[in-house]
Image: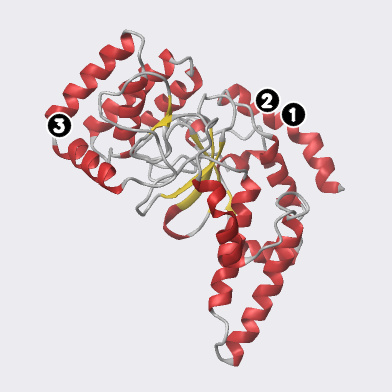
Amino acid sequence: MAAESRVARDRTAIERRFADDWGIELPDSIFRYWLFLLSLGPVEQRALHDTELRPYGIMDLFDDPACPPREGLDVRVHGRYYRDPPEFLTFMHGGTDGLHFGLWYDDGRTCTGVASYYNNDGGGVGLPSGTPLEAVREQIEWWQAHLDSEAGEDEPIAANLAEERFRLRALREVLVTFETGDRPEEGRTYHETYRDEDEVLEDGDPIRFETLDGGGALADGESVVPRGRQRPYDRYDWCTNLHKQLTGDPGSVAAWVTEAMQRCAAGDPASALTLGRDLHWASEGDAERERQAHELLVAAYRALGRHNLAAITDAHHRHRDLPQVGVLRT
């Protein structure tokens, strides 16, 4: 009850902070995630630590909505990793190789779903889907599958596994009181059962142009770079070939940028949005690709009326060389 009272008491101030500084609407699902965190006892908190999940990014402001950034820094880059698309807003860190999870904002205002990727490893963000607690449940069941694979070891290890299984079950029991209570499967069976829900595109799903980051870009029009509809899997050959062109053929890239900007000025921002996202993802510390990505994305977002995403792009461009992504004053 104390946790529910706190969420009810502080929600308005939190929503106001994000509306004022980011220009976004926080979904109900992020407050359920917060209530879930506040509801955990010591055993469940230890289990969450076992899975290497911890709240981060925007969640740091839930404890203190008025917390300012350090002098000279923009609060909108707190928790924003170098390759994060502007649509991505970090709320949870996952431990190994820079795994982190973000709310996704296609239109810059309302949350489309959750995406995640390994900042220090390969792969992309994937199509946004689900809720923060669904993302936690998926990680719980991956951890359960890992523990299941460790069964049959010697006695001391078995004892430790039993304790870890107990903690994980306690964590799951709390989570399903908020979401996914209709899913009794556990471990690998859970992922085998519900995997197809994330891999099938329905006819009514929004059509996103495929992008190098794997999240897709929501826009109407045509693309300078040949690309299809974003799918829930990486088109390895397409991504590899485009990455080579973006990083190895500056003359062609400059020509694409010029044409994309011209099309955007003429009322078709699709090329600027998609190519800008590609160059943002493939910047790799190159100042010219960073500049091109910034120019394209700001133009595209403004043409699409996504002015807060343009502002986030501006802020990130100014601070992409920060050695750490935490910028709040502590």
Q: Residue at x 81, y 36 (%)?
A: 8
Residue closest to the eye, 254 or 65: 254
Q: Residue at x 59, y 54 (%)?
A: 194
Q: Return the residue at label 2.
A: 16
Dividing the picture into quarters, in which one does residue 110 lie? Answer: top right
Residue closest to the eye, 7 or 217: 217
Residue at the limit of the structure toward the front, as seen here: 203
Determine whether the residue tagged by mark 3 lies in a helix, strand or loop: helix
- Neighbor class of circle 1 (other Cα within 10 Å; few <14, some 14-19, many 20+) is few
Determine whether the residue tagged by mark 2 lies in a helix, strand or loop: helix
Disc assigned to residue 211: none
Residue closest to the eye, 36 or 291: 36
> Does 109 sit left or right of 163 as displayed?
left
**In contact (CB < 8 Å): disc 1 and disc 2:** yes
In the picture shown, does residue 270 fall above or below 182? above
Disc assigned to residue 12: 1
In the picture shown, does residue 167 fall above or below 276? below
Residue type indicated by callout 1:
Thr
> Does 191 sit left or right of 245 as displayed?
right
> Does 133 sit left or right of 228 as displayed?
right
Cα separation between marks 1 and 2: 6 Å
Q: Return the residue at label 3.
A: 250
Q: Quadrant of the C terminus?
A: top right
Residue type indicated by callout 2:
Arg
Q: Give the percent coordinates (x, y) of residue 103.
A: 56, 38
Cα separation between marks 3 and 2: 43 Å
Cα separation between marks 1 and 3: 48 Å
